[in-house]
Structures are given as structure tokens and as C-alpha cells.
Amino acid sequence: MIHRKSPNDLDRMAAAGAIVAETLGLLAESARPGMSTLDLDEIAERHIRAAGGVPTFKGYHGFPGSICASPNDMIVHGIPSDAVVLVEGDILSIDVGVTRQGFVGDSAVTIMIGEVPEATKALLRTCQASLAAAVEVSQVGGRVGDIGHAVQGVVEAAGFAVVRDLVGHGVGRSMHEDPQVRNYGDAGTGPELKTGMTLAIEPMITAGAYDIVVAEDGWSIFTTDQSLAAHFEHTVAITDDGPRVLTLAQGTSIVDAEI
Ligand code: MG
Ligand code: MG
């Protein structure tokens, strides 16, 4: 069942989303070689709680972290750890969820640790551009399939692959609501997009094949061919005035991040 939100609900989701955006910004500024992903987790949790939010991921099906921190060929769901220390040239996908006033905001970015090769930057830029394209088609009267189709078009035109086995999702009072939002497929298919729907749109793409493998910890998901992966996500509301991105930092746009 798809839960549609009132304008008042959307404002509350935007308040949660603002904390998510601030946290991701803080982590992007803080991350540098020599830091562990557990260091980043601690920075995030402190900021989220100080801002009046609760880290949604912490304790979710037993997940121990406040963030997911997934380096290089890890696509998503990395457990923050003092054993994972960032080095120059890494990329790191950071996913943050915040609950505030009963609503969840969910957003992710892939950041660069120092200088990375141009081919890696192209992977990140493409993932971000595919998210922007997906947001653009998130219009009343469209279909959920339009979103995946938009992502796939951008990603495959650039020579990268879309992960098939992981999807975006409805989000609101719970982190995971209906519908599932695939990052590939046909336009004009799937549930109709209606005003008040709120979706976590999250392209996950790789520089190689799209096959995935779950690690022994039961959480971390890697590319099977060890190719690099990127992940960008925003929480987006479908409104009569067009898509409203609820997890943007004030005064920024989706493609602002310098890559
Ligand atoms: Mg997320
Ligand atoms: Mg999500």
C-alpha cells in the first residue's frame, strides 16, 4: 500500500531531510585519509542527535551504525568500523537516515577521498546525473517505471551498469514503504505517480558488471567483479508543483557537489 502524505507531513519530512543533508555535508567535509568509517559514524550520530533527530539506521534489523559507509567496490550497507581506514584515492558511499517528528529522510552521496582518477569521477558524476534525471521525471501523472527508465538511460549511455538487485523505495513514517523504485526498466509502467507520494530514489551503479554479493557480515554488499560502485540518493515528494527534493541542503541543487 502506498501512503500519500499531506502538505504538513511533507514539511515534517523536509525537517528530517534537512538534518540528513547537513549530516552528509559535515561528513563530506570531515572525511580524509587516516580516518575510519567509525569516526565518521560518531560525527554523524552526534550531529543528528544534537539537531533533534534520531539516526534511523541504528538498530534497524540489528544494524549497528548510524550511517552506512561503503568504500570502493562496496555498493551499500557498509557497517562503520575502526578497521576501515580511508586512504587517498578511495571513494566512499555514505547513506544517512534521520527520523524526526515521526518521519524519515533518507539520502546518500559518494564522496572522493583526496584525488581520484578521472574515470572514477565520471562514475560519480554519472550516478549523480542519473539521480537528477530521475527526479525530473517524478511528476504527477507519470509512472514509477519512468524513474528507473531515466536512471538506466543516463547510466548506460555513459558505459556504466545499473545494479538490478537493489532498489529505491517509498519512505515516510517508515524508512521502507511501497512502492519499490527500480533503477532500470520501461517508462510508462508501474504504479502511477500521485501528489503526496514520497520516494527514496537511489541509483546504485558500477564501473563493471551489475552482479552483487553479500558479505559474511550479512550487511555489506559488494560488486562481484570488484569494480567500483557509486550511490546517490534523495527523498523526493511528488507534488502538484513538480518534484520536491526533501533532502537538499538549503540553497543547493542536486548537481551542486563538485566532482
Ligand atoms: Mg539511504
Ligand atoms: Mg533508501
Image (cartoon, rainbow, N blue to C red):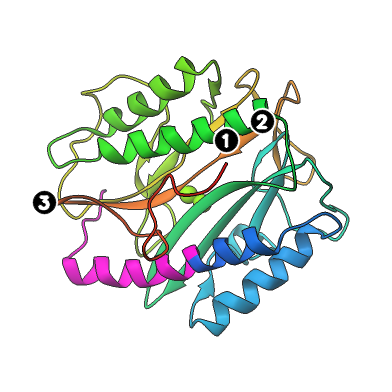
Q: Do the residues labelled 1 and 2 touch (CB within 8 Å)?
A: yes
As drawn, 138 above or below 187: below
Q: Which residue is drawn at 63% across and 66% down?
A: 66
Q: Decide: few, some or many residues near mark 2? Use Cα within 10 Å; few <14, some 14-19, many ≥20.
A: many
As drawn, 166 above or below 80: above
Disc 1 target residue: 124
Q: Nearer the viewer, residue 190 or 109?
A: 109
Q: Which residue is drawn at 15% across and 46% down?
A: 194
Q: Is residue 170 visible?
A: yes
Dot 2 falls on a residue whose secondary structure is helix
Disc 2 target residue: 120
As drawn, 196 above or below 183: below
Q: Which amino acid does label 1 sit on?
A: Leu
Q: What residue type is labelled 2?
A: Thr
The residues colored magenta run 2-21
For the residues carrying marks 3 and 1, which lies nearer the camera in this image? 1
**Picture coordinates of residue 255, whole percent (x, y):** 43, 44
Horizontal side of residue 32 vs 17, given as left or right? right
Disc 3 target residue: 240
Horizontal side of residue 134 vs 47, given as left or right? left
Q: Which residue is drawn at 54% across and 46% down?
A: 258
| Dominant secondary-structure state across the stretch colored magenta | helix
Q: Which amino acid does label 3 sit on?
A: Asp
